[in-house]
Image: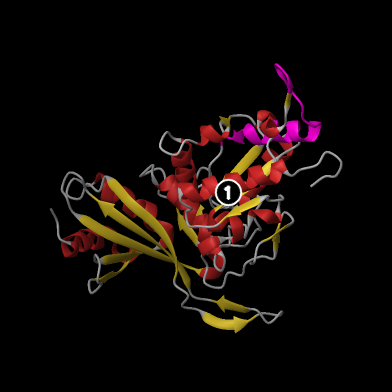
Amino acid sequence: MGLLDKEFSDGNIVVANVEDLLNWARLSSVWQLGFGLACCAIEMMATSASHYDFDRFGLIPRNTPRQADAIIISGTVTLKMAIRIKRLYEQIPDPKYIISMGSCANCGGPYWEHGYHVLKGVDRIIPVDVYVPGCPPRPEALLEGLLKLQEKIRNESLRKKS
Amino acid sequence: MKKAEEIFEILKNEFGDIILSFDKDTPTEPIISIEPLKIHIVSKFLRDNAELQFDSLMCLSGVDDANGKKVKDADGIDIIEGGTLSVYYHLYSTVLRHKITLKVSAPREDAKVESVENIWKCADWHEREAYDMLGIIFLNHPDLRRILMPYDWFEDSFPLRKDFKVPEFYQGMKIPY
């Protein structure tokens, strides 16, 4: 249920409950950490460029984890990088969301068997909200992932942690 | 421009026994084998000699020849015993436009090769990579650390060795699928 289908009881007052308001505010301004890992990052950049325009969903890159709300894990997570990703994740203030983009971040991708240096899925170190399959996923797929994340945020509750 | 045979003759006359063999029947370039602990002397000659002028080290690669015996160790894990690890040097002269490939082979258990870092500067990171992936020790290298794997990666664990086994955990993260 959207915020603005609530009735307008007075000239410039909108009646809504706090939960809806908070969720609407959060899902409309998911600021992602400006952060890319491999070829998926190229697709992510294409998604944020003018042709697909991430910004119309309120998603803009932010250059410090302390002011970001989400990370898109866009690429192969090496063991070396995994330690850094964990630290970045811990520096993001709550509430924070993770989109795992592409086969490598989901489960290791083509490196699943012989990748001695690859973490087989970023969900081994941080909790993932949305998995976007593909190698790499097209911008449409990433947009779909973002819409799924927004749906998830819309149904969050203040009383219980999701 | 010199042919590989001529380059081999020049080296053989200059160094004698240090130059081990000449392999012409390779699908790629002819290969000259050299003593691992004398490669820096030969390299310096190759660079500075007026007839040769090999001013460019195009590539330096480590190779696990896996020509030892396959045995099981105390825990029943397959390992390779004996045999050699090799380093290949692909040289090019930008002045005289000729190429040659050098090869040194060191025993697997104690793979020590002289560094050519002070002859071709670009060998620095190449040698670090060969050390990182295969555990070949380059003597007199100024900064022989791991370059690709984390600095705190397991000692004596070299991923491109043919008997490499993936560790179960690294810093609490499970590595196998």
Q: Quadrant of residue A6?
A: top right
Pinpoint residue B119: horizontal percent, then vertical percent.
Answer: 36, 44
- Which of the pair A77/B5 is nearer the observer? A77
Look at 70% across and 17% down and name the residue there. Answer: A12
Mark 1 closeness class: few <14, some 14–19, many ≥20 residues within 10 Å: many
- Which of the pair B120/A6 is nearer the observer? A6
Q: Quadrant of residue A150?
A: top right
- Which of the pair B29/A58 is nearer the observer? A58
Q: Which residue is mark 1?
A: A145
Asked whether, in this view, residue B146 is left or right of residue A67, the answer is: left
Residue that protrudes farthest toward the right in the picture = A159
Look at 43% across and 50% down and name the residue there. Answer: B126
Pinpoint residue A43: horizontal percent, then vertical percent.
Answer: 46, 45
The verdict on residue A11 being magenta is yes
Q: Which part of the image, by quadrant, shows the C terminus of chain B?
A: bottom right
Give the residue type that dot 1 points to: Gly
Chain letter for mark 1: A
Q: Which residues are magenta?
A: A9-34
- Which of the pair B2/A39 is nearer the observer? A39
Look at 60% across and 36% down and name the residue there. Answer: A32
Residue that protrudes farthest toward the top in the picture = A11
The verdict on residue A14 being magenta is yes
Q: Secondary structure at mark 1?
A: helix
Residue A23 at least partly seen: yes
